[in-house]
Amino acid sequence: MKQSLVLSSLLAASTVSFAQTPQKIDVGSLPSQATLVENVVVPVPSEVFSALDRVGKPNWEQVLRTTKDQAVGESQPQIALQLGLVIAEGFIAVEAENTEEVKRIGGTVQKLSRALGVEQHVTKHANAILKSADAKDWVGVRKELDRTLKDVRKAMLDLGSEPLSQLISLGGWLRGTEALTDVVSRAYNADSAELLHQPVLLDYFHKRLTSMPANIKKNPLIDDMQKGVLEIRPLVGMEGAQISERTVKDVGLVAGRLVKSINSKIN
Amino acid sequence: MNRLSLALFAAAAVLLPASASATIDDSLSFALEAADPFVKQGFSVREDYWGGDLPVKQTKAIVHQLFKGIEYWFWMGTEVKDAKISIHVYDSDGNLVEVEAKTASRSAMARVVPKKTGSYYLIVEVEKSPEERTHWALAYGFR
C-alpha cells in the first residue's frame, strides 16, 4: 500500500519552480526557526574514491594494506578505532577489486566486532561480504560495508557507548583520508587535492573528541587523535584556497601517523 | 552566528538516537522508496540518514560535506498523508546549487552536482501538513 502511495506520489511529482525558491540565503544568519540538525553524516570512503576514479585511474592495489595478522587492541577505544580503519580498508579493497583481501577483511571485521561485544550485529553482513566478494559483486560489498558501519555504530549506541561509535567513524575517516592523500600525491592535481577540503568533518571530530567522557579521554590514543585533527584542520579548512602538493603530503603524514598509532599503541 | 560557529554547532552524533521513533522510520521508508528508481540508475544510497519532526513553515538546516565530481540526490520523506515537504541545497556562500528539485505529497528531492568540494546546507521544510508536527527523514545517494 505504502509503495503504491509513493509511486502515485512520484508520478504526480512536479519539478519545483526555481522562482519559488530563494536563490540565495544568508548562511551566516539563518532565520531563527531554521535550527540546525545536529547529526553529521560522515561520508564513506567510496564516496570520495568515486570522485578520484573520475579524475584518473588510481592504482588502488598500491594503496591497499592487508589486514592479515591484524592484532586486536587492548582497550575498547583502540578496538573501535581499529574497526573503523578495517572497514575503510574494505572500501579500498573493493576499489582494488581484490577478492581475497575483501574476504579477509570480512573476517577481521568480525574479530574486532567480537572484541567490542557486537559481533551478532555484524555476522550477517560479514557473510554477505564473503558471498558478494566471491561473486565479484563490488556494489554489493560496498553496500554491506556501509550496513556494517551503520549497524555496529547503532549497536554501540544501544549499549550506551556513543563515544565508541564516534571513534569507529573517526578511524574510517582517517584511513580514507590517508588513502586519498596517497593517491593524490602519486599524481597531484588541484581538483583531486580539493577533495581534502572537509572542514565540517574536522570540526565534528574535534568537538566529539573534546567531549568524550573522562574514562575514554584518559586513553593516550584520544589525545593523539585530538592533536592530529587539530593539525589537519588548518591545512584543509581554508575556503576557496587551493590545497598544494606539499599540503597533501602533510595531511597524509598526520593521517598516516595516527593510523600507525591506532595499530601499535599499547595502552 | 558565523559560519564556523554553525559548523561547530552542527557537530554531534553520527547516527540518529536509538530511540528514533517508528514514525521517522516510516518517513524514511517513503524517502527510500522515492530513491528506488535512482538506484537503478547507479546511485548508491547511504545507510545513514537524518530525521526529526517539524511544525508547518519551520525549516531545519543540515550542514553536510559534498565532493566535486560526484552527483548527489537527496530524498526527503514523510509518513503524513497530504503533507507537502521540501528540500533545497545551498553552498557555503548561501547560493542555491541544486540542478533539479521535485516535490510530491509524501516526498521531495533535490539533485546536486557540486562545483566545489566543501560544506553545503541542506534546508528541509514542512510547507503544509494536517498534523501539528510532521515527522520527516532525509536520505542521500551518490554516483
Image (cartoon, coloured by chain):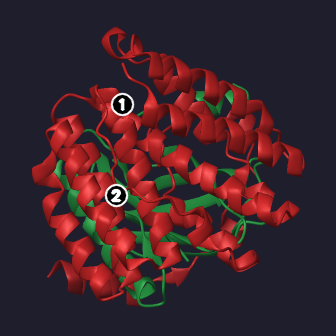
Chain colours: A red, B green
Q: Nearer the viewer, residue A90 or A46?
A: A90
Asked if residue B116 can be seen in this view, the reply is no
Asked if residue A176 can be seen in this view, the reply is yes
- Residue at position x 48%, y 53% from top? B125
SS type, badge 2: loop
Residue under label 2: B129
Q: Nearer the viewer, residue B11 or A182?
A: A182
Identify the subunit bearing mark 2. B
Quarter placement of the N terminus of chain A: bottom left
Which kind of residue does numbered mark 1 sit on? Gln
From the viewer's perspective, is B137 left or right of A203? left
Which kind of residue does numbered mark 2 sit on? Ser
Find residue B72 and report its horizontal and vertical position in percent.
Answer: 58, 71
Q: Nearer the viewer, residue A82 or A263?
A: A263
- Residue at position x 27%, y 38% from top? B17
Residue under label 1: A78
Which quadrant of the structure image shows residue A266? top left
Q: Give the residue at the far left of this rendering.
A: A120
Front tag of 1 and 2:
1
Categorize mark 2 by other alpha carbons within 10 Å: few (<14), some (14-19), many (20+).
some
From the viewer's perspective, is A162 left or right of A67? left
Q: Say if B96 sits above or below B50 in the image.
A: below
Find residue B97 and report its horizontal and vertical position in percent.
Answer: 72, 64
Q: CA distance from mark 1 to mark 2?
A: 47 Å
Find residue A169 and report its horizontal and vertical position in percent.
Answer: 43, 43
Q: Are marks 1 and 2 in contact (CB under 8 Å)?
A: no
Numbered label tally: 2
Categorize mark 1 by other alpha carbons within 10 Å: few (<14), some (14-19), many (20+).
many
